[in-house]
Amino acid sequence: MLEKYTAPLTLNGIPLDYTKETFIMGILNVTPDSFSDGGKYYNVEAAVAQAKKMVEDGAKIIDVGGESTRPGYERISDEEEIARIVPVIKALLAEVPAIISVDTYKASVARAAVEAGAHIINDIWGAKSEPEIAQVAAELNVPIILMHNRVNKDYGNDFWATAKADLEESILIAHKAGVPDAHIILDPGIGFAKTTAQNITMMQHLDELVAMGYPVLLATSRKSMIGNVLKLPVEERVEGTAATVVYGIEKGCHIIRVHDVKEMARATYMTDVLVDKRMYEEEA
């Protein structure tokens, strides 16, 4: 139950009513070095074409990232990241009927992206790397996704209690900046600062994350947890990703962030029907 979520947000004319469907967020990396699709959509035309395809396949949110966050990534300058994403965001607004989120943990990049037209800030550091990013979200009146992350994998004796406390710190930063509860979305941070066993434990506590009362975004697409369990390379993790998507929806997640939109949209639709989120109507 979304205790903190009072009414559906409408972003770019699209209502985010989580009672009626699980929303698909398509990943659009405009980077040369992302772990799965680096370099594929590194110019505006290719990025727009891919975004259009993802919307046709079922995505209602497009997540634009200008800096790779793969393990061991190197930070680029704010100016370079802005130069990569702003032209893409402007082109998407003109040509693609979707909600646009910006995947960044940098306050100045988030500001530039939202001023260019982005509708959501997606922060992999949960407003802890640059707390000013929460002020940007509050000032520009946009939702912010707070992902679980930390600088080490030492969770003490109780993994979930520690991870939950980490997220509560992010929520407090957002609240202090003036972000309302209705604009906060949580992400368990699968693949970040966690061993494979810890990622699995986090997945098993998704229902407790949902019980915190905020919409929850699940981003497991092609990640190492799947590769390590199935012993498969990145390009062969579609079925494993689908399993995590179905499991996440059963646990109550509201948004699914994926690379393989068509396949995951189908898995999501079927699961939504099975969990009574969507109504199946018999053909006449």
Image (cartoon, helix red, strand yellow):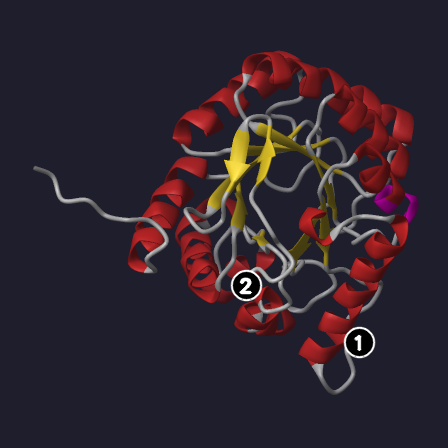
Q: Percent position (x, y) of residue 181?
A: 72, 54
Name which residue lies at 83% across and 53% down.
Answer: 174
Q: Tell me the quarter of the picture where residue 41 sits.
A: top right
Residue lying at the far front of the rendered structure: 6
Instruction: Report which residue position mark 2 lands on.
Output: 228
Residue lying at the far bottom of the rendered structure: 157
Q: Is 34 situated above or below 233? A: above
Quadrant where the C terminus is found in the figure: top left
Q: Is 33 situated above or below 79? A: below
The CA distance from mark 2 to mark 1 is 20 Å
Instruction: Report which residue position mark 1 lands on.
Output: 154
Q: Tell me the quarter of the picture where residue 102 sits.
A: top right
169 displayed left or right of 217: right
Q: Percent position (x, y) of residue 118?
A: 70, 28
- Tell me the amino acid under the disc marked 2: Asn
136 displayed left or right of 202: right
User: What span is colored magenta in the figure?
Assistant: 130-134
- Rendered image: mark on residue 213: none
The answer to which of marks 2 and 1 sits earlier in the sequence is: 1
Name which residue lies at 43% across and 48% down.
Answer: 238
Q: Nearer the viewer, residue 35 or 59?
A: 59
- Tell me the amino acid under the disc marked 1: Asp
The kind of secondary structure the magenta stretch mainly shows is: helix
Q: Residues within 10 Å of mark 2 (few under 14, many from 20)?
A: few
Task: Point out the frontmost of discs 2 and 1.
Answer: 1
Q: Is 117 situated above or below 198? A: above
Name which residue lies at 61% across and 54% down.
Answer: 5
Q: Nearer the viewer, residue 166 or 227?
A: 166
